[in-house]
Amino acid sequence: MSASSVSSNDPFRSLFKQIWWVVLLRGILAVLFGIVALVWPNITVWALVIVFAAYVIVDGIVLAVHSVRDKIEGWGWWLAMAVVSVIAGLVALFWPGITALALLYVIAFYAILFGIAGIVGGIRFRKVHDSGWIWSVLAGVLAVLLGIVLLIFPGEGILSLIVLLGIYAILFGVVLIVLAFQVRSTAKKAGVL
């Protein structure tokens, strides 16, 4: 599929023109969250809950607005990811006495569900040349792996959780930033930016 055939496909023209900055914003937020987690490894459980909740709620809202507004193919998967994010954030916010173990399970299940939705959503874009779908799938795989590791090793302690979560967030954010610039490049080639 050439760039000219992408530019003539209106749903993808709109998508490539608008999605790159949304993905970039999500990547930057993830990297910032990861840096906060790594710079302050002695952060309290309460502070981690607030930072985690704020990150996933903002991320979910940005993703929900974008998926509903553009209604591109596979928008339901992106909306599902947004709903999972917001629900996980609200659970964390409205459960202020959450224990480290309970937080670990909330984050683990959030990561697995979010990752699965990201993998499925990314695969739906594999037919679009230069869409960067592989980066979306990779981000989803990272999320699922994080969730599985947290479920398999729940007793490693809150400090280990914070460090692991920080590393994951930075990797996830970098993958999203790379995806954003790939989508932007595709949009420029198609003449929509």
Image (cartoon, rainbow, N blue to C red):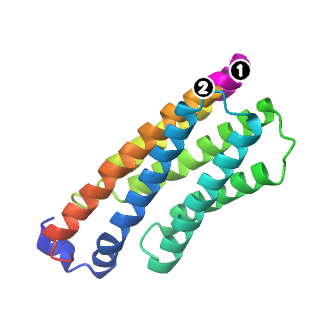
Q: What residue appears at the point 42 percent right and 65 percent down from the top-left corner?
A: 22
Which residue has dot 1 on it? Answer: 157
Question: For numbered disc 2, what is the local secondary structure?
Answer: helix
Name above or below for residue 46 compared with residue 11: above
Q: Which label number is shown at residue 71?
A: none
Q: What residue appears at the point 56 percent right and 65 percent down from the top-left corner?
A: 79
The kind of residue on which mark 2 rests is Val
Classify 10 Å Cα crowding around label 2: few (below 14), some (14-19), many (20 and above): few
Name above or below for residue 190 compared with residue 32: below
Percent position of residue 174, x then y: 37, 43
Q: What residue appears at the point 48 percent right and 46 percent down from the top-left corner?
A: 32
Q: Quadrant of the C terminus?
A: bottom left
- Identify which residue, 174 or 74, lies in the foreground: 174
Q: Is 62 in the magenta?
A: no
**In the shown orientation, is residue 155 left or right of residue 176?**
right
**In the shown orientation, is residue 132 left or right of residue 79?**
left
Does residue 167 show up? yes
Question: For numbered disc 1, what is the local secondary structure?
Answer: loop
The kind of residue on which mark 1 rests is Gly
Q: Which residues are magenta?
A: 150-160
User: Which secondary structure type mostly characterizes the magenta part of the structure?
Assistant: helix
Classify 10 Å Cα crowding around label 1: few (below 14), some (14-19), many (20 and above): few
- Identify which residue, 188 or 74, lies in the foreground: 188
In the picture as drawn, the residue positioned furthest to the right comes out as 97
Which residue has dot 2 on it? Answer: 149
Q: What residue appears at the point 55 percent right and 40 percent down from the top-left corner?
A: 36
Q: Do residues under tags 2 and 1 come within 8 Å of each other at their CB atoms?
A: no
Percent position of residue 54, x then y: 64, 55
